[in-house]
């Protein structure tokens, strides 16, 4: 399972990408997300956003939540996607085994 630091960094990187995607002009990495957060009353500069993305600093929970809200990044997906992938893989394996068993039973007659 991924660490909390990795999940936070991934969320910030996703939010940065989505904030940049909505811009006509290219800004320095982290600048678009910093501007969005500043507009929501959060005191942060692009360098701070980049530090969050690198994992060099941990954003306050309220800032992370606001960044995700402003850019439509799903915290649930980031937290649980790995777990869900594992569950799906296990279910697929069980279905394959059941189908193989059914095919063997049919072949025997």
Image (spheres, rainbow, N blue to C red):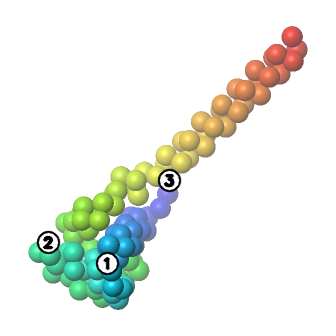
Q: Is residue 107 left or right of residue 12?
A: right
| Residue 57 quadrant | bottom left
Q: Position of residue 75 (x, y in %)?
A: 34, 57
Q: In the rendered view, would you say 2 is above or below 107? A: below
The residue indicated by pointer 2 is 40
Q: Is residue 26 left or right of residue 45?
A: right
Of the image marks 1 and 2, the number of the one nearer the N terminus:
1
The single residue placed furthest to the left in the displayed view is 41
The residue indicated by pointer 3 is 82
Taking the spot 30% from the left edge, 88% from the top edge, the residue there is 47
Q: Nearer the viewer, mark 1 or mark 3?
A: 1
Query: Label 1, label 2: how many angstroms apart (C-alpha)?
Result: 17 Å
Q: Is residue 87 left or right of residue 12?
A: right
The single residue placed furthest to the front in the displayed view is 24
Q: Position of residue 99 (x, y in %)?
A: 72, 26
The residue indicated by pointer 1 is 23
Of the image marks 2 and 3, the number of the one nearer the N terminus:
2
Of the image marks 1 and 3, the number of the one nearer the N terminus:
1
Q: In the rendered view, would you say 34 is above or below 1? A: below
Question: Mark 3: which secondary structure?
Answer: helix
Q: Position of residue 81 (x, y in %)?
A: 46, 52
Confirm or deny contact between disc 1 and disc 2 (CB under 8 A): no
Q: Nearer the viewer, mark 1 or mark 2?
A: 1
Would residue 19 be seen by someone viewing this image from the given angle? yes
């Amino acid at each position: 399972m991924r660490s909390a630091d990795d999940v936070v960094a991934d969320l910030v990187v996703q939010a940065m990408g989505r904030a940049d995607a909505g811009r006509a002009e290219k800004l320095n990495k982290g600048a678009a997300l910093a501007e969005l957060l500043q507009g929501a009353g959060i005191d942060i500069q692009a360098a701070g956003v980049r530090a969050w993305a690198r994992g060099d600093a941990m954003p306050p929970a309220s800032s992370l939540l606001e960044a995700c809200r402003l850019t439509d990044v799903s915290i649930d997906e980031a937290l649980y996607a790995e777990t869900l992938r594992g569950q799906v893989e296990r279910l697929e394996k069980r279905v394959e085994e059941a189908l193989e068993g059914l095919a063997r039973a049919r072949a025997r007659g």
